[in-house]
Image (cartoon, rainbow, N blue to C red):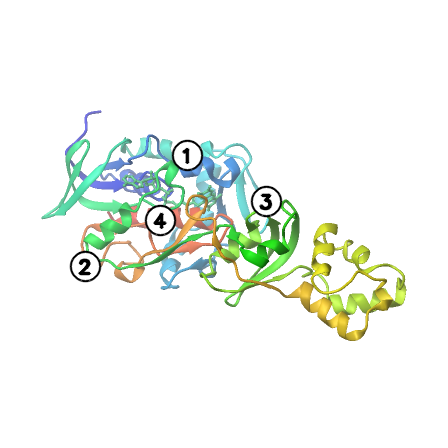
């Protein structure tokens, strides 16, 4: 098919949101050109969820998203929520399973989700062009794009270029630059859903424990997540840490409860009664990895038979294991972060159509926006929901 110079709609960015927007608009009869500068479309979909794409979550609610405009996501999530995406997945007979906390993953490979979206694009007669660079955008009565494929024009322009994470598979700051060009505000961005690094004495505390995991509660800035934590050679990782990283800012303290399932003070009192001669380390190791139990103890007290601790010591041991306070030195950065928090300020857009209030015909969808989901399928759901709603209007 030869490339048309003028289309109703051009979508820049053929990731989750761009594909969903393009197929929705195309199936309404709009002529749509979908451009991407990468060599292939949907690369993040392919690598997501460890190759199994956690494509949505059954329990999506507005409170699972972080944004300076917390009500913005509600309209799109209610118009195209998990049920609608699951119905599409089931129509394509893609097998899936619920892993935990409502998270839905493909039983097979992520590729099945991408193939489904591409088939829907084919139905909508979407033209897809990869390896296409957009060098400049100008607006007159329509949008004029200077691209590596020549000059292109459209009435509606959708920016779906995602965030800054994983530049190696195509992430760029294009969307933010474009927003700035057209007068939209960019809110501060940080790597999100990312491991936290430790420095100095905090890193020393965990030295030699790399690979040790624990079921913990982690808190920061009034938010608490109860999931697994993994100690790495640089700091802390695992779902609990990735979740809290969305709420952490440089300099903030995080508090880790290493034994969230029990009240250690009361448990030690019970041990003193029923197992007085057992050492505290042995008893703690029934609830925590042996190495972590031992390391935790070395910072506060000697390992003794449990009946040899006085009340004051028991209180401080309990406090230590329930409220381990650390100030991370940073994150492992955009290179490995699953998302970018912050981004295009949604206060300049319609929550129904995603059109810029002051620039008719210009739309922003997906991760480029200041809407960031928790770990667990929420970010893809945001891409599907925002892409669908814009696709209904463009
Ligand atoms: C390793 C990893 C695993 C993840 N797993 C999950 C998961 O299981 N579940 C979940 O919900 N979320 C997951 N996420 C997050 C999720 O992938 C993103 O939130 C989602 O893909 C965002 O969709 P998007 O369409 O806005 O952006 P993207 O999917 O990032 O798509 C943006 C597209 O724009 C293109 N682009 C960028 N700049 C330009 C430019 N200048 N010109 C042209 N094209 C451009 C890119 O090549 C890309 O194709 C994961 C992320 C990563 C990095």
Q: Secondary structure at mark 1?
A: helix
- Marks 1 and 4 sit apart, C-alpha to C-alpha, by 16 Å
Does the CB distance between marks 4 and 2 fall below 8 Å? Answer: no
Q: Secondary structure at mark 4?
A: helix
The residue sitting at 49% across, 38% down in the picture is 90
How would you rate the neighbour count of disc 2 (Cα within 10 Å): few for under 14, some for 14-19, many for 20 or more? Answer: few
Q: Earlier in the sequence, mark 1 or mark 2?
A: 1
In the image: residue 122, left or right of residue 233: left
Q: Earlier in the sequence, mark 4 or mark 2?
A: 2
Residue 215: x percent and y percent?
A: 65, 54
Q: Is mark 1 within 8 Å of ligand 1?
A: no
Decide: is 311 above or below 155.
below
What residue is pinned by disc 2? Answer: 358
Q: Secondary structure at mark 3?
A: loop
Q: Would you identify the image quadrant in which residue 351 lies?
A: bottom left
Q: Earlier in the sequence, mark 3 or mark 2?
A: 3
Task: State the residue in front, 213 or 183.
Answer: 213
Image quadrant of ligand 1 equals: top left
Q: Residue furthest toward the left?
A: 140
In the image: residue 219, left or right of residue 183: right
Q: Earlier in the sequence, mark 1 or mark 3?
A: 3
Say which mark, if any, is on residue 366. 4
Q: Earlier in the sequence, mark 4 or mark 3?
A: 3
The residue sitting at 62% across, 51% down in the picture is 228
- Marks 4 and 3 sit apart, C-alpha to C-alpha, by 24 Å
What residue is pinned by disc 1? Answer: 114
């Amino acid at each position: 098919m030869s490339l048309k110079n003028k289309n109703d709609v051009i979508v820049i960015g053929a990731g989750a949101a761009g594909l969903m927007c393009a197929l929705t608009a195309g199936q309404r009869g709009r002529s749509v050109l979908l451009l991407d500068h990468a060599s292939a479309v949907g690369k993040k979909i392919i690598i997501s969820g460890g190759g199994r794409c956690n494509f949505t979550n059954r329990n999506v609610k507005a409170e699972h998203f972080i944004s300076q405009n917390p009500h913005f996501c509600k309209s799109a999530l209610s118009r195209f929520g998990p049920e609608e995406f699951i119905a599409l997945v089931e129509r394509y007979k893609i097998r899936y399973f619920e892993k935990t906390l409502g998270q839905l993953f493909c039983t097979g490979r992520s590729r099945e989700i991408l193939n489904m979206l591409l088939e829907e694009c084919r139905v909508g007669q979407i033209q897809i062009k990869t390896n296409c660079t957009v060098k400049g955008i100008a607006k007159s009565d329509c949008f004029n794009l200077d691209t590596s494929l020549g000059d292109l024009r459209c009435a509606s322009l959708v920016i779906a270029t995602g965030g800054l994470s994983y530049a190696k598979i195509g992430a760029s700051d294009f969307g933010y630059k474009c927003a700035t060009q057209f007068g939209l505000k960019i809110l501060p961005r940080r790597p999100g859903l990312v491991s936290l690094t430790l420095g100095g004495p905090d890193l020393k505390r965990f030295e030699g424990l790399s690979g040790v995991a624990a079921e913990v509660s982690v808190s920061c800035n009034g938010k608490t997540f109860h999931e697994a934590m993994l100690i790495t050679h640089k700091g802390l990782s695992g779902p609990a840490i990735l979740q809290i990283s969305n709420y952490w800012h440089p300099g903030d303290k995080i508090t880790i409860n290493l034994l969230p399932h029990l009240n250690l003070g009361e448990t030690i009192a019970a041990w003193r009664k029923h197992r007085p001669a057992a050492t505290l380390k042995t008893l703690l190791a029934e609830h925590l990895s042996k190495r972590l139990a031992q390391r935790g103890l070395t910072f506060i007290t000697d390992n003794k038979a449990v009946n040899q601790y006085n009340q004051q010591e028991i209180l401080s041991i309990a406090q230590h294991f329930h409220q381990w306070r650390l100030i991370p030195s940073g994150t492992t950065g955009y290179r490995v972060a699953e998302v970018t928090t912050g981004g295009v300020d949604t206060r300049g857009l319609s929550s129904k159509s995603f059109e810029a209030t002051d620039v008719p015909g210009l739309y922003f969808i997906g991760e480029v926006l200041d809407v960031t989901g928790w770990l667990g399928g929420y970010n893809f759901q945001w891409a599907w929901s925002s892409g669908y709603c814009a696709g209904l209007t463009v």
